[in-house]
Amino acid sequence: MATAIGVVLLWPDGKGPQDRRLDTTYSAPGGTIVEGTVAALRTFDCPGGEVAPGLPGKEGTLRCVSVRVGLDTGPKAGSEVKVDLPPEVDRAGIAAGDRMRLLHVAVGPEKTDYYAFVDFVRGTPMAALAIAYAVVVVAVARLRGLRALLGLGFAYLMLASFMLPALLEGKSPLLVGFVGSSAIMFIVLYFAHGLSARTTTALLGTLFGLCVTAALGWWATDAARLTGLDGDDSFILLASTRTLDLSDMVLCGIIVAGLGVLNDVTITQASAVWELYELSPSMPARRLFMGAMRIGRDHIASTVYTIAFAYAGAALPILLLVTLYERPFLTALTGGELAEEVVRTLVGSIGLVLAIPITTAVAVVVAKAAGTAQAANLAPPPGRRIARHAGHTR
């Protein structure tokens, strides 16, 4: 009920983003985005001064690429245009048949058409990869895997329709992150794993982990003075809104980032307790807790590595840049480029570690109580036991 009330109170009304957002568009003023297919390409040397590391070309020149693109969309679809590409695009690799997005602008009083490279069109390979992922999940996990995929779709819907618009309207990032994450966990856990005491136990552990993550994240972002200004996208976001506080966005991001791992460890830990209990229903509660925690400690060790390396992989370009600067390791680690990733890793790991013993303890209590209640329901009434015993005596 608290989560539902929070969603209702924080739900965006649709007025805030228009009032708070500046006049910005996806393309340049007066321009449109069109798509096309590379028909042919030609490489040539162009002036470029000193060659940057990793870019092709000789000293004083760079290898540039000019492509002929057949337009697939836009008012001039079906015609071909010439587009010069920057060396970085050539370095990434380009061949005939590649599809790309172009910016079309009419320049000058004569409205001369000008086309510039924007990005590649990656829809087909990404869709193929998503289909392969769905097929593998359903083939291995079957109906439960299908329900998990549908739950994932709901999670992204909740993120796009509730959390992001609410943040743009100036709602509290702490409340939006916590309420939105709680709502996602309610739907995802019950939908994927069924309505049961085992799932409820995992949900309680997840909510506890979210509370710890939110509290630590709130303190850490303030104590470490995390500004959220860690790239060009941050400055573009500031330029596109009037009063958005990026440090609060860091806090919301910390909460959302812990969802997946918390869900993983809590549902696994609850399942471990139930499996151990079903193998030995007479096992004392303390013994059951200690046995499940041995599994939990292995899970902690492996998941901490998972979090750390996931963030390290995401921040790899920043790590390379810091290495080129030859700064002291501690200075680089606490600098603005890496501080957010380090804080996010530490806060998420603490919430994860503390959620495991709490989930285990709750699961032991619930499993024992459920087993006792089931045994009482299955036991015959006292009178029937006496009559059966008397018949056996005769």
Image (spheres, rainbow, N blue to C red):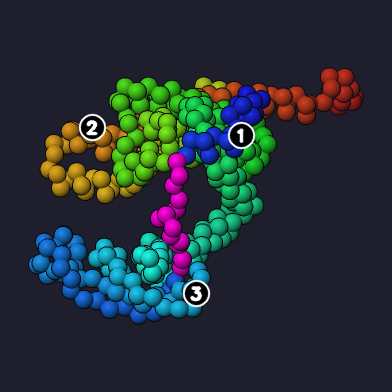
User: Image height check: is 23 above or below 135?
Assistant: above
User: Within 10 angstroms of label 1, few (less than 14), some, or many (20 or more) residues?
Assistant: few
- Residue bearing mark 2: 334
Identity of the amino acid at label 2? Thr
Q: Earlier in the sequence, mark 3 or mark 2?
A: 3
Numbered tag placed on residue 13 in the rendering: 1
Give the quadrant of the N terminus.
top right
Which mark is nearer the camera, 2 or 1?
Answer: 1
State which tag comes first along the sequence, 3 or 1: 1
Query: Residue 286, labelled with which disc?
Result: none
Regarding mark 1 in the picture, which secondary structure is present there? loop
Position of the C terminus, as image quadrant, is top right
Q: Determine whether, in the image, residue 80 is placed left or right of residue 88.
A: right
Q: Which residue is mark 3?
A: 77
Residue 187 screen position, x and y as percent: 62, 38
Q: Position of residue 104 (x, y in %)?
A: 41, 65
> Which span is picked out in magenta?
22-35
Q: Residue at x 46, y 68 (%)?
A: 35
Q: Nearer the viewer, residue 375 or 264?
A: 264
Helix, strand or loop for disc 3: loop
**Is label 2 in a helix, a strand or a loop?**
loop
The residue closer to the viewer here, 209 or 201, is 209
In contact (CB < 8 Å): disc 3 and disc 2: no
| Residue 225 included in the magenta stretch of the image | no
Residues 299 and 328: in front is 328
How far is the residue under mark 3 from the one under mark 2?
51 Å
Residue at screen point 15% across, 65% down: 48
Horizontal arrangement in the rendering, residue 352 relative to residue 223 (left or right): right
Residue 5 location, quadrant: top right
* Amino acid at dot 3: Ala
Q: Residue flagged by tag 1: what amino acid is it? A: Asp
Q: Main secondary structure of the magenta part?
A: loop
